[in-house]
Amino acid sequence: MILETERLYLREMEQSDYNSLCRILQDKEVMYAYEGAFSDAETQEWLDRQISRYQKWGFGLWAVILKENGEMIGQCGLTMQPWKDRQVLEVGYLFCHMYWHKGYATEAAKACMQYAFEKLNAGEVCSIIRDTNLASQNVAIRNGMSKKDCSIKYYRGVKMPHYRYVASAKTGCNILHF
């Protein structure tokens, strides 16, 4: 286990999480900001990328497990992402549709932000969010992040404006204690 919150725990994903990950990445409603659901091959590539990130950096997107039933309900964690001319530390999150609007993304992302500040000594953490993804923008705002700037990404042949929301270690992120 990497992190624990009141209702959740986060751990590294494993190959055995593939079917749970498919429930997230192959749901077109969940994946609307990515212009559609992933194929089996794209889902496996996503999982392989997270496992590689754990080995390279010691973090990545982690499986979010609901304590009450042990079910993987989403993924949340930290990744290095390209932003304009540099790499930035991002907290990202994707959850099964049936678990939206219950505060799980906010709870998990807050824990990941605090992990970044306390364990990784990060100066700032950001979330890079598509301009049409209001739900994720609201999670960032609830977590004390502010919209900093905008950039265009091209994905699946689509021009997508993205906002970068940022929280700094200076402003604090006193949410949990490990």
Image: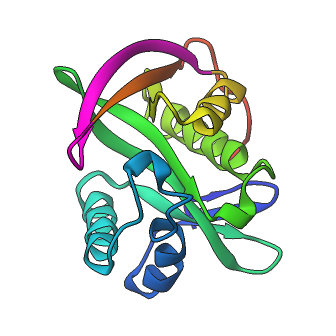
Residue at left offset 21%, top offset 21%:
84
Residue at left offset 66%, top offset 48%:
105
| Left or right: residue 80 compared with residue 76 | left
Residue at left offset 41%, top offset 79%:
14
Magenta region includes residue 84: no
Residue at left offset 48%, top offset 74%:
21
Residue 97 appears at what percent x and percent y?
A: 66, 62
Q: Residue furthest front?
A: 158
Vertical relation: 12 (above or below) 81: below
Magenta residues? 145-158
Residue 150 appears at what percent x and percent y?
A: 37, 16
Residue 169 appears at what percent x and percent y?
A: 53, 19
Nearest the viewer among 91 and 153 is 153
Vertical relation: 3 (above or below) 128: below
Vertical relation: 127 (above or below) 12: above
Nearest the viewer among 96 and 178 is 96
| Left or right: residue 109 compared with residue 106 | left
